[in-house]
Image: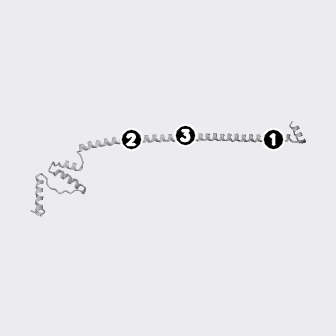
Amino acid sequence: MARNSAEGNKARVARYRAGLAARGIRPVQLYAPEGAHALLRQATGLMIREQDPLEPRQALRQASGANDPEEASFDLGKREWALAAEIETVRAELIAAQEAERQAGQRALEQTEAARVETRRAETAEGEVAAVKEREAAALTRADSAERAREAAEAAAAQTRAEIRQFQEAPGLRGRVIRWLAR
C-alpha cells in the first residue's frame, strides 16, 4: 500500500478506531459553542491518552483549571482571608501615610511660622540697627556742626581780637578814644 493512498488512509483510520474501541472509546459527534472547542479537545486528549488516562470529570476539571468543590470552597475561603488581611494591611499603611502627611504638614506650618517670626526679628533688628545708625549719623552730624560752629566762633573771636588790637594800636586821637573805651 502506498503511504498516501486512499486505501492506506482507510486502513490507518480503521486501525486507529479499533485501538480506541479496544480501550472502550467510541467516536461521537458533538455540537458545542466555538469557545468550548479547545476545552473539549484538551479534556478529550487527557481522557484518551495511552499513559495515565484521566476520568472525564478529572479531565474536564484539569482542562478548565477548576478544582474539586471542597477544595474550591476551601481555597475560596483562603483567598477571602488573604484578601481581607491584605486590605487591612493596605488600610493600616494608608492610615500611617495620612498621619505622616498630616505631621509633615504640621511641621511645615511650624517651620513657616518660625521663619516668619525670625524674619520679623531680623527686620526689627535691622530696623533697630538702622535707627541706631541714623542716630549715630545724626550725632556725628551734630558733633560735626558743633565743631564747625566752635571753629567758626573761634575764628570770629580771633578776628575780633585782631581788630581790637588793631584799633588799640591805632595812632592818634582815634587810638586813644578806642583804648579809653576798651578799659
Q: Amino acid at mark 1?
A: Ala
The answer to which of marks 1 and 3 sits earlier in the sequence is: 3
Q: Which residue carries the number 2 mark?
A: 93
Q: Which quadrant of the rendered structure holds the N terminus?
A: bottom left
Q: Which residue is mark 3?
A: 118
Q: Is residue 116 left or right of residue 183?
A: left
Residue in the image at 43% along x and 40% along y: 100
Image quarter hosting the C terminus: top right
How many labels were placed on the picture? Answer: 3
**In terms of sequence position, does the residue under pointer 1 or pointer 2 come before the other?**
2
Instruction: Give the quadrant of residue 18.
Output: bottom left
Left or right side of 25 for 123: right
Tag 3–tag 2 contact (CB < 8 Å): no
Q: Nearer the viewer, residue 35 or 15?
A: 15
Under tag 2, what secondary structure? helix
Q: How far apart in space, not on screen, are marks 1 and 3 (Cα)?
A: 64 Å
Percent x, y of residue 155: 77, 41
The kind of residue tagged 2 is Glu
Above/below status of 166 relative to 50: above
Outermost residue on the right side: it is 173
Instruction: Read off the residue under disc 1.
Output: 162
Q: Are marks 1 and 2 in contact (CB under 8 Å)?
A: no
Separation of residues labelled 1 and 2 (CA atoms): 100 Å
Q: Residues within 10 Å of mark 1 (few under 14, many from 20)?
A: few
- Which is nearer the eye, 80 or 164? 164
> Residue 177: which quarter of the image?
top right
